[in-house]
Amino acid sequence: MKKKNLLILYFPLDDPAVSDPFELLEIYKQHGTSVIEIALPTENPILDGKTIRDSMARVLQFKTLEEYFEDIGKVSAKYPKLKIQLMAYYHLIEKFSIEKFAEKVKKCGVSYVLSPDAEPEKIKEMEMVLCPLGISVIRIAPCILRQEEVKLFRNSKGYIFQRTSNGKTGETHEFSGSLQENTKLLRENGINTPVVYAFGISEKKQVVQAMKMGADGVVIGSALFSYISDGTVHEYLSNFDEWFKD
């Protein structure tokens, strides 16, 4: 059986700039989306570029975090087979406590949690609470992975989030050869968790390059917004159908 490549697309839940979010999800499904990433909005998303920052700011004008969790649950209820990844900066998790945060994400049907600024010891704490609930805590691989860091990924669940740069989301760049070496190093150490490339991916040539370098999938985030706003997201995602659509 052919391996299913992972296509993870950012979903701007509750962003008033998106006229029909459920129509957008239908389009995502048509193009083989494996996981949708929903970001818990914050006033200071330090690793995100202007596009995501502006989207979060719009959401915060109309929704509280409690209402936002309720809306995630509505998405999960309508699309039970579509996996949801919640991206949450660690200060938001601490605001609830890991235990209460875990209760909320379990209740609203989240499958993966990604906390881009959480320190390794905090990731371990999150895993101890979330994993028994069936929720994978996604670990992030640096652009250059050292041998001594490989052990951090031995028990990774879901997939490994491979950063393609040290910049912010939305910044385009050329892929470094170190990314391919990272994947090779993981495989040589018996780690077979899917590796997904993220940050700055927007064009077909980047997806093709990622796959040739050993990636098992990609995350597309900021690049989606312009196509969503001008109504051409269906045409845009068609560029990637040969890699992700069943």
Image (cartoon, helix red, strand yellow):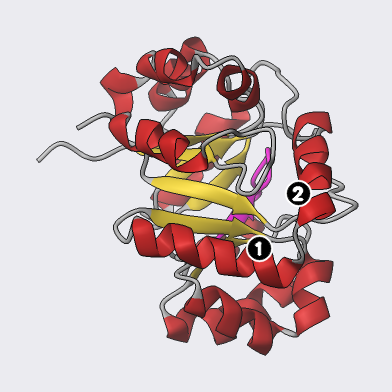
Q: Which residue is drawn at 79% across and 69% down?
A: 92
Viewer-closest of 225 and 74: 74
Circle 2: residue type = Val
Screen quadrant of the N terminus: top left
Q: Mark 2 points at which residue?
A: 59
Mark number, residue 68: 1
Residue 62 location, quadrant: bottom right
Q: 95 left or right of 244? A: right
Magenta region = 138-147
Looking at the image, residue 232 lies above or below residue 114: above
Circle 1: residue type = Tyr
Asked if one can make out residue 203 in the rendered structure from this viewpoint, the answer is: yes
Looking at the image, residue 185 lies above or below residue 171: below
Image location of residue 70, percent across then percent down: 58, 69
Q: Is residue 141 highlighted in magenta?
A: yes
Q: Tell me whether the residue at label 2 lies in contact with that at label 1, contact meaning CB atoms closer than 8 angstroms.
A: yes
